[in-house]
Amino acid sequence: MSTPSKTAVAGGPQPAPPSPPPDGPGRQRARTIPWSKITPYLLITPALVMELLIHIVPMLAGIGMSFLELTQFYIARWTQAPFAGTRNYRAAFDLSGSLGLSVLQSFLITVLFTVLVVGISWLIGMSASVVLQRSFRGRGVLRTLFLVPYALPAYAGIITWSFLLQRDNGLVNQVLTSLRIVDEPTFWLLGTNAFISTTIVTIWQMFPFAFLMTMAGMQSIPEELYQAAALDGASVWQQLRHVTLGMLRPINSVLLLLLTLWTFREFNTPYVLFGSNPPESVNLLSVHIYDSSFLNWNFGFGAAMSVLMLLFLLVVAGVWMLLSNRGRRRAA
């Protein structure tokens, strides 16, 4: 047999290169890990785990408890508590019974408390921001003093207020009697005055946050807007209304929502001031849930009220989102 010539081999089609041998049973193909895609998930994993353990799991457990007749008779063996269905929810809405009436009373007190605290806190914080916006001597000291309640631990501040509001040796009564505003010392922690005291202490805690948010927002308002408004003949009130409040509308919207959510579920102030048995005028919904759960040992009913409070706050947040989106569409 004749062998092909070198010319034919050189001019003809070249043979394909040999394919690499397949991987053996003990050989693994090297692969690069896309760390740029995995890193964000690794960074948020601890936060997701903590959120799951601290908020999601207890919330689901509370929802499950609201459908059980979990009383003091089943605390030791809570897994054997009988299923109550919607009985706890029906009792909360039954205005013909004592439980429903007490829930309604607590809800109305909480709504009034929230409106007063949020409105006055925002008004004080906004007013302080406007006054301290202009540069003058001592402005830094005043700003620091306004932020002191926000920096103090909540329990330390409330305990201090409880001493100040005492009838016999409290500083509040001493100042009022020395100025002859009242003839004799007043019981600030009893009866209707207890609601006033709780509202004042909560405002003292809340208004620094409103002051901080509005003051930070006013830093971003250009000074040229005030100058142009002054040249157009706008008064100080008109500048405040149309320029300041107009530019701070997104910040104030979020601020009022946060203050509402925080104040509606406020528990620390009445509990530290009055303990586990506050006056009827301070029977907020959070305090009522605590009493039903840990004093009356009716954890199922307390969990049902907690779920109802959560649903109410979700409705408030949802209405706020709808109104905010509608305002943005009109502005656009």
Image (spheres, rainbow, N blue to C red):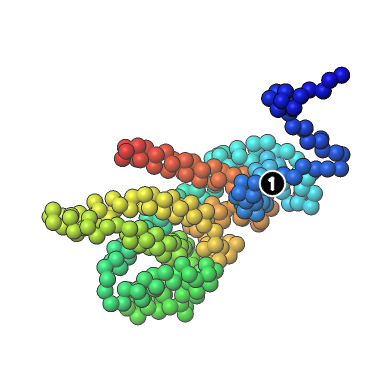
Residue 197 in view:
no
Specify the quadrant that holds the C terminus: top left
Q: Nearer the viewer, residue 66 or 48?
A: 48
**Residue 242 higher or lower than 67, as above or below:** below
Lateral position of residue 23 relative to residue 310, left or right: right
**Residue 170 higher or lower than 59, as above or below:** below
Residue 238 in view:
yes
Looking at the picture, how far across and down is residue 82, in whole percent? 75, 40
Residue drawn at the location 44% of the way across and 55% of the way down:
259
Lateral position of residue 33 relative to residue 190, left or right: right
Residue 90 lies in what quarter of the image?
top right
- In the picture of the structure, the residue carrying the numbered disc 1 is 32
**Residue 156 higher or lower than 233, as above or below:** below
Specify the quadrant that holds the N terminus: top right
Determine whether the residue tagged by mark 1 lies in a helix, strand or loop. loop
Residue drawn at the location 24% of the way across and 60% of the way down:
223
**Residue 68 higher or lower than 75, as above or below:** above
